[in-house]
Amino acid sequence: MKVVIVFSLGGSLIVPDKVDHDYLTKFKNFIEKLNKKYKIIIVTGGGKTAREYMKEVKGDKVKSLIGIMTTKLNARLISGLFNITIDIPDTLEEVKKQIEENNLVVTGALGVQPHMTSDGNAAEIAEYLKAKIFINLTNVNGLYDKDPRKYKNSKLISYVDYKSFNDIIKKIKYEAGQHFILDQAAAEIITRSKTETAILNGKDFNNLQRFFDKKEFIGTIIS
């Protein structure tokens, strides 16, 4: 069987304000090329769509349910790009079965798990399948010492070990629909499983190609 790679595709890339047709076209082309060498699992986030819906309701449980369903909606959108018509998998076992039978699998959050996130599920899938690498595609270049969208003097952290990364993430309080580079659930899972993880800008396809070509790239490696 081909090597398995797991992507967590941030909802902010899929729907930054409205569905980004140009981005999704480029993403589709990139994945189809990569798919010739690797089996690929894409886990979609909820992004702005989820957060906009959550504004209208109260209660963490209701917000979590909305977030979960939005990831599944985005998963159906992405699977549609690749003309995938089979059911969106909802358990680890279903993901495993589908990736054994297909080269590409798309899913959102698995089941309905309190405080679990699409990032967390992507990390969970990578652990379960012993994937070669877990790649978090986001809208910034990697992990920074502070938010690069707010601070011009922020510095990119090109490498961090599991423990240090987990310590950073633990300081952030969990909230349904939160927007962070890679969340608490994922941090805990990659730390215990020692899954090599990369945080990369999902919009920079030239940089993504350099990463897979083992050339110099911009991003963060957690290992």
Image (spheres, helix red, strand yellow):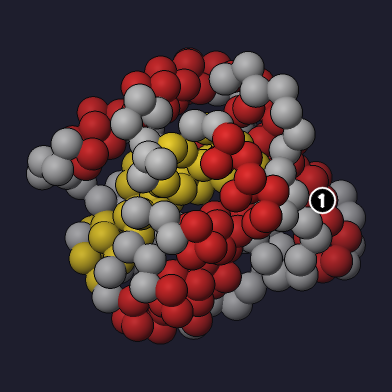
Q: Residue furthest left?
A: 216
**x, y percentage for residue 83?**
63, 17
**x, y percentage for residue 80?**
65, 21
Residue 59: image quadrant is bottom right
The reply to whether residue 112 is visible in this rendering is yes
Callout 1: SS: helix
In this rendering, is residue 150 above or below 25? Answer: below
> Quarter holding the C terminus?
bottom left
Tally of marks: 1
The reply to whether residue 207 is visible in this rendering is no
> Quarter holding the N terminus?
top left
- Residue occupying the point 46% across, 48% down: 6
In this rendering, is residue 46 above or below 118? Answer: above
In this rendering, is residue 46 above or below 178? Answer: above
Amino acid type at mark 1: Ile
Q: Residues within 10 Å of mark 1 (few under 14, many from 20)?
A: many
Q: In the image shown, does 152 or 34 lie closer to the viewer? A: 34
- Residue occupying the point 23% across, 39% down: 212
- Residue occupying the point 35% across, 25% down: 36
- Taking the image as shown, residue 21 lies to the left or right of residue 48, namely left
- Taking the image as shown, residue 127 lies to the left or right of residue 81, namely left
In this rendering, is residue 72 above or below 181? Answer: above
Q: In the image shown, does 54 or 154 lie closer to the viewer? A: 54
**x, y percentage for residue 194?**
37, 73
- Residue occupying the point 55% across, 41% down: 100
- Taking the image as shown, residue 50 lies to the left or right of residue 191, namely right
**x, y percentage for residue 216?**
10, 44
Which residue corresponds to mark 1? 66
